[in-house]
């Protein structure tokens, strides 16, 4: 694959593997422009842009960004939780389309890139945008230790919620908590040890949705996970375990391509070869 030469920060919407060396990205998304800092120092995978976030945000925009869906009579904005928000692209994209977003990741990612990227870009989102809150969520922490009323932490093995300062996106705003209408994650499962924690976290969020809105909800949250097939063993383990609880369906490549092209990702097929979006649905409630 021929690699395009990229030498400055003002390259927009190239595949993430071509911009890893840039400390700051300028990224266009519909009527918005995001200025995103990233780090590629090897300390953690979550501090740089990955193609999964680019493709997932484009696909979500096509399917969940239309105003009729946003205005279907609910007494609140639709809510999305992202598991592993990284540098914040998907969170900002969906917020710009009218969603309230809870962006979550581990402490090192939150502290190094995610929180600052949200703070830098949130004031510049278009009218009608939702809001974003950022909190730490470690999938390995048992859900019995989760808290939803803290400004900074849902669950962490290293950080006590009471030790943190407020980072809610709007001072005095209420905390975003279940029920969420969408649960999404991109490029977050790259080894076998992450499979069970991710699915446990998704299971708990689905259960919390019914607990918190037992009479108002007639549908389970929609769940969408974007994966890059680097290691087929990891991907198949995730899908096999997910099928024990959910109906699992792959988004057709044609639908992905159409969404990408409509949202500024005019790439060659070999640029995004191996990327897949999978939708998980709970069986119908009796």
Image (spheres, rainbow, N blue to C red):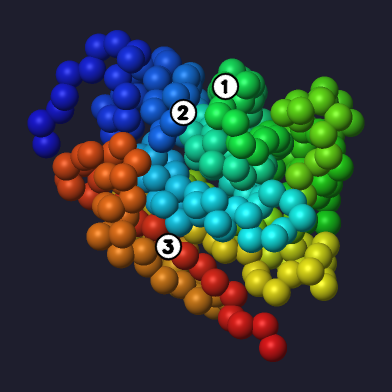
The residue nearer to you, when weighing 42 against 77, is 77
Asked if disc 2 and disc 1 are in contact, CB closer than 8 Å, the reply is yes
Q: Secondary structure at mark 1?
A: helix
Q: Quadrant of residue 207?
A: bottom right
Please state if 95 lies on the left or on the right of 253 as rendered: right
Compare marks 3 and 1 and give the one earlier in the sequence.
1
Q: Residue at x 61, y 82 (%)?
A: 284
| Residue most extreme to the left | 2
Q: Secondary structure at mark 3?
A: strand
Compare marks 2 and 1 and give the one earlier in the sequence.
2
Where 68 sits versus 261, above or below?
Answer: below
Image coordinates of residue 163 in percent, x first then y, are 86, 26
Q: Residue at x 83, y 39 (%)?
A: 174
Asked if disc 2 and disc 3 are in contact, CB closer than 8 Å, the reply is no
Residue ID for mark 3: 278
Q: Secondary structure at mark 2?
A: strand
Q: Residue at x 31, y 59 (%)?
A: 255
The residue nearer to you, when weighing 100 against 148, is 100
Residue ID for mark 2: 32
Where 179 sits versus 97, above or below?
Answer: below
Q: Residue at x 57, y 63 (%)?
A: 222
Image coordinates of residue 216 in percent, x first then y, are 79, 69
Compare marks 2 and 3 and give the one earlier in the sequence.
2
Image coordinates of residue 234 in percent, x first then y, are 41, 58
Query: Which quarter of the rendering shows the C terminus?
Result: bottom right
Residue ID for mark 1: 124
Where 223 sits versus 151, above or below?
Answer: below
Image coordinates of residue 210 in percent, x first then y, are 77, 68
Q: CA distance from mark 2 to mark 3?
A: 27 Å
């Amino acid at each position: 694959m021929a690699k395009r030469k990229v030498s400055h920060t003002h390259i927009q919407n190239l595949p993430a593997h071509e911009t890893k060396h840039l400390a700051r990205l300028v990224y266009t998304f519909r009527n918005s422009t995001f200025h995103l800092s990233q780090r590629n120092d090897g300390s953690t995978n979550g501090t740089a842009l990955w193609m999964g976030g680019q493709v997932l945000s484009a696909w979500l925009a096509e399917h969940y960004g239309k105003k009729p869906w946003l205005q279907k009579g609910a007494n609140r904005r639709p809510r999305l939780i992202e598991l592993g928000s990284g540098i914040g692209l998907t969170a900002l994209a969906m917020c710009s389309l009218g969603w309230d977003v809870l962006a979550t990741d581990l402490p090192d990612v939150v502290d190094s890139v995610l929180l600052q990227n949200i703070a830098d870009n949130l004031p510049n989102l278009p009218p009608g945008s939702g809001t974003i809150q950022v909190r730490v969520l470690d999938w390995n922490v048992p859900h019995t230790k989760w808290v939803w009323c803290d400004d900074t932490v849902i669950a962490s093995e290293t950080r006590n919620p009471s030790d943190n300062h407020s980072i809610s996106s709007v001072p005095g705003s209420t905390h975003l908590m279940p029920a969420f209408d969408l649960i999404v994650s991109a490029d977050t499962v790259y080894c076998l040890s992450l499979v069970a924690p991710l699915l446990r976290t998704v299971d708990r969020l689905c259960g919390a949705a019914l607990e918190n809105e037992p009479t108002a909800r007639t549908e389970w949250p929609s769940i969408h996970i974007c994966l890059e097939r680097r290691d087929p063993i990891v991907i198949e383990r995730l899908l096999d375990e997910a099928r024990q609880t959910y109906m699992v369906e792959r988004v057709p490549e044609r639908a992905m391509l159409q969404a990408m092209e409509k949202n500024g990702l005019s790439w060659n097929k070999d640029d995004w070869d191996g990327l897949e979006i999978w939708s998980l649905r709970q069986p119908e409630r009796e």
